[in-house]
């Protein structure tokens, strides 16, 4: 059976989620309190509905209980975001993802049972800052406060050496989980794999260890 999604709040984030889900073949109900926003999505979403989602009876009448995953992308109105999340939880929606405006908002959302909280502006900002600071780090994904996955361009010092030669795990405490080479992804490379010119290394480790690795070897 096809998964059913609902997205509440059709700003830039919610709108983009709706468009992408539809492009990927999913069925999506798009909901906003603002009828102009809903009109924009009438031709895009499977269903587009004007509703104030802080009203429990309204949410129930939409049959929101039957959706497997609901995204709350209401930004500025923190009260509406919290109330909506609380009602979705009470109604028994299996999976709820919510956009947080700040850390306090996130704490409240997690306390009332949001399954996942996202901070697109904060996370994209951190990513951009990390990318800007390093010429070698091509991309960056924060796993926790301490650990990350980064993509680094293999430089001249690494090219031609095998992973055994470089002894990266023992020397730097980090793991190369994949190598991007000519549009292929070599997942879990073997120790005898030889790094080639143009390789991009996908590295996992603590931020501190990654920083050391980058300083010393790249
Ligand atoms: P963006 O993703 O563009 O950054 P934002 O975080 O700035 O969005 P808002 O523009 O404040 O968030 O809200 C997103 C949408 O949520 C708006 O289109 C708004 O009309 C809608 N919205 C706000 N309150 C409610 C509500 N009670 N019920 C349904 N939709 C609502
Ligand atoms: P967010 O990243 O929070 O989603 P946003 O995309 O909604 O931000 P705004 O809040 O409209 O963007 O603008 C971001 C910042 O840019 C604001 O602090 C605003 O004061 C500043 N700003 C807007 N116009 C100018 C300008 N012409 N020159 C300098 N700063 C500006
Ligand atoms: Ca915004």
Image (cartoon, rainbow, N blue to C red):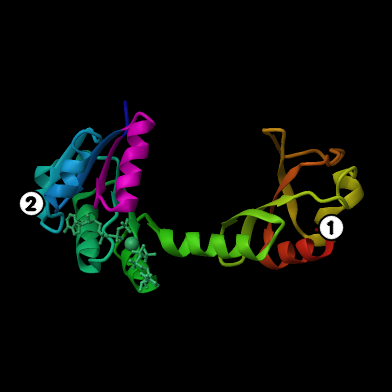
Q: Is residue 138 left or right of residue 96?
A: right
Query: Relative to 163, does residue 73 appear above or below in the rendering?
Result: below
- Is residue 173 on the magenta stretch? no
- Label 2 crowding class (10 Å Cα cut-off): few <14, some 14-19, many 20+? few
Q: Name the side, left or right, on which 120 lies relative to 131.
A: left
Q: Does the magenta-highlighted stretch encompass residue 19?
A: yes
The percent position of residue 55, horizontal first and vertical second, equals 10, 57
Q: Which residue is mark 1?
A: 170
Query: Which residue is identified by label 2?
Result: 57
Residue 110 in the image, given as x and y percentages of width and height:
35, 63
Q: Residue at x 62, y 63 (%)?
A: 132
User: Circle 2 — which element?
Assistant: helix
Residue 209 as seen in the image, left or right of residue 147: right
Callout 1 secondary element: helix
Q: Is residue 97 above or below residue 17?
A: below
Q: Position of residue 178 (x, y in %)?
A: 70, 42
Q: Is any atom of residue 159 visible in this view?
A: yes
- Give the quadrant of the C terminus: bottom right
């Amino acid at each position: 059976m096809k998964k059913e999604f609902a997205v509440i709040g059709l700003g830039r984030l919610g709108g983009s989620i709706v468009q992408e889900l539809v492009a990927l073949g999913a069925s999506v109900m798009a909901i906003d309190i603002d009828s102009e926003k809903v009109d924009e999505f009438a031709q895009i979403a499977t269903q587009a509905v004007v509703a104030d989602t802080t009203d429990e009876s309204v949410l129930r009448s939409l049959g929101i209980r039957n959706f497997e995953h609901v995204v709350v992308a209401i930004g500025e109105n923190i009260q509406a975001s919290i109330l909506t999340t609380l009602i979705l939880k009470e109604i028994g929606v299996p999976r709820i993802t919510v956009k947080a405006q700040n850390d306090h908002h996130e704490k409240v959302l997690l306390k009332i049972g949001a399954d996942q909280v996202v901070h697109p502006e904060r996370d994209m900002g951190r990513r951009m800052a990390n990318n800007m600071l390093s010429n070698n780090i091509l991309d960056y994904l924060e796993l926790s406060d301490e650990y990350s996955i980064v993509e680094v361009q293999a430089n001249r010092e690494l090219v031609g050496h095998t992973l055994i030669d470089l002894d990266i795990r023992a020397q730097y405490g980090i793991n190369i989980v994949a190598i991007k080479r000519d549009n292929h992804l070599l997942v879990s490379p073997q120790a005898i794999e030889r790094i080639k010119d143009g390789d991009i290394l996908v590295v996992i480790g603590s931020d501190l260890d990654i920083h050391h690795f980058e300083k010393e070897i790249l």
